[in-house]
Image (cartoon, grey):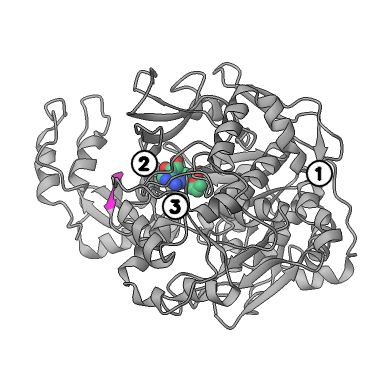
Amino acid sequence: MSDKIYDVAPEWQKRAFIDNAKYEQMYAASVADPDKFWAEQAKRVDWIKPFTKVKNTSFAPDNVSIKWFEDGTLNIAYNCVDRHLAKRGDQTAIIWEGDDPKDDKKVTYKELHAQVCKFANVLKAQGVKKGDRVTIYLPMIVEAAYAMLACARIGAIHSVVFGGFSPDSIAGRIEDCKSTVIVTADEGVRGGRKIPLKANIDEACDKAGGVTSVIVVKHTGAAVNMKAGRDVYYDDAVKSVSADCPCEEMNAEDPLFILYTSGSTGQPKGVLHTTGGYAVFTAMTHQYVFDYHDGDIYWCTADVGWVTGHSYIVYGPLQNGAITLMFEGVPTYPTNSRFWEVIDKHQVNTFYTAPTAIRALMQAGDEPVKKTSRKSLRLLGSVGEPINPEAWEWYHRVVGDDRCPIVDTWWQTETGGILITPLPGATKLKPGSATRPFFGVKPQLVDAEGKVLEGATSGNLCIADSWPGQMRTVYGDHQRFVDTYFKAYPGKYFTGDGCRRDEDGYYWITGRVDDVINVSGHRLGTAEVESALVAHPKVSEAAVVGYPHHIKGQGIYAYVTLMSGEAPTEDLKKELVGWVRKEISAIASPDLLQFAPGLPKTRSGKIMRRILRKIAEDDFSNLGDTTTLADPTVVDDLVNNRQNRA
Ligand code: PRX
């Protein structure tokens, strides 16, 4: 913890939409009368048919039901594109910066409109109709935004799969939502390295079945296998379609997208977001949290494969008529100065990134930052994991030249948008704290028994009532939605995070309290990594835990028991790490892997993760009570053969 406090600078109080008095007044109004507050906020969206009902939500475990603006109709692609044409048709909508610094382009709102309409007609020509699921597996190229908005335009539900996921992971997601149409590219490029996207899709389609159409965007121009009757190049398909495509009229509660995310048990679940509430909430949070004014140049470095890319590269900014930058590359290519060079090149005003990137760049020292100007920067943002005060201070002092406030935004795939955050014109900053709730958000800290804790305290973070951007269900499995989020503390949404509230009512997220780990801002279920490991023919059992990692936030520590007769060699270790990479993704591959002849289990066979976590954290002096273990001697072997974290 840091005890420094950064006041709001006078120029920010003047410039910002929300100062502290306004925050207090609006927050009080938002929780006192949500219907009135959100009806007013919903005016920022253009509705086709206005709603008459605002909030209709229940968190009761036997009746979890979340509906906002339920009798209104709208189209979010219209809100992102068409409605801006009259006023800002010739203004840039998207600045694209390629992996290679020589590659960039700008797309105006008028061009975006034409491209989205054409893309929508290509989808229609492939048979896509309202309600159909379309899987999008693209690199960070403008076509990713076109494809998402094209789906939204015709009422199809997109499921974007991060370009780093393996064929197996893609296949699981295609099967889960039964999507028959895929949009991909020949290859992606990151940090100069090619990613064989189309080849991955071919393999995924072999595993999943049911895919009738693969639309391939030419990006690098590499020759790829095209299956006759199934695969079509976008460039060819687009030749025969018109640039005119009306927007489908969508009910506020019609699904907009599915995004798969990891939980503490089982395979990733399809988080379902709907149209109206998500539109209002992402537009509003984008405007207020980033204090977005017309003409500002805004850059969020996330990938569209994650929720941050959905809400704060595409839907939030474009609804606000913003200039949003999309970056294909990585922070370290060609050099450690890349982020800052892009900021200078495009005169970026607002920069939003993840703590893991900040920590990695901090290691490279100040010089790669200081040799750039960054004079255009006004506001910095952080998302995805707790930011340690040292990284926060470095970001503030070195990147922001002590001039730019930092908004540390806490939220989740499930929340659709930012829930706890500073507002730059209103909130005094404390390094490492996500500070205060956004409008309409009622955080509560509860103890293990569910008792609500008051005042300065620590506990499990719940949200007491619904907000418009909240997920509506787990696609195809409403019971899983109820069980995951509403069972532990009945009547509340449980976030899975631990949190502290200080004397000023500031919130400090301490990280997950369930079996989810956060590796470089990427969320992984330990169960997923374990099930990948046990799928290897030589592995009998596996247990995976997180441990503190100085750059990634958390690293992955895997304990593996081999089939009897298998030798625990260094080669096998490498093979298993590579296996997980292939089964899930590079982000899931264990940092440390230890062969364990036995795992610490209770007599009823439950693995005692607490002990495994302590050993992984190098905190094995006090392992607590081990007498309840079926075989307490396994612990000595685990401690003696622990892997070196350095
Ligand atoms: O543990 C919290 C952490 O990331 C989790 C959500 O991950 P995901 O659904 O992938 O969404 C990430 C981008 C919104 C949370 O449960 N997290 C996210 N932002 C923060 C954070 N932890 C601390 N501080 C944050 N600002």
- Looking at the rendered structure, which numbered label has been put on residue 522? 3
Q: Amino acid at mark 1?
A: Asp
Q: Identify the image quadrant of the C terminus.
A: bottom left
- Which range is magenta? 543-548
CA distance separating discs 2 and 3? 13 Å
* Comes first in the chain, label 2 or label 1: 1
How many marks the image carries: the answer is 3
Q: Quadrant of residue 110?
A: bottom right
Q: Is mark 2 within 8 Å of ligand 1?
A: yes
| Secondary structure beneath label 1 | loop
The amino acid sitting under disc 3 is His
Q: What's the distance in space between the residues labelled 3 and 1, CA to CA?
A: 34 Å
Three-letter amino acid code of the residue under disc 2 = Gly
Residue 485 is labelled as none
| Closer to viewer: mark 2 or mark 1 | 1
- Assess whether residue 247 is covered by the magenta stretch: no
Q: Is residue 215 above or below residue 640?
A: below
Q: Is residue 547 visible?
A: yes
Q: Earlier in the sequence, mark 2 or mark 3?
A: 2
Q: Residues within 10 Å of mark 2 (few under 14, many from 20)?
A: some
Q: Position of residue 484 (x, y in %)?
A: 49, 29
Q: Residues within 10 Å of mark 3 (few under 14, many from 20)?
A: some
**Which disc number belongs to residue 46?**
1
Q: Residue at x 75, y 45 (%)?
A: 132
Q: Which residue is mark 2?
A: 511
The image position of residue 434, as x and y in percent, is: 43, 43
Q: Is residue 546 magenta?
A: yes
In front here: 397 or 518?
A: 397
Along the line of sight, the residue nearer the viewer: 366 or 401: 401
Q: Are marks 3 and 1 in contact (CB under 8 Å)?
A: no
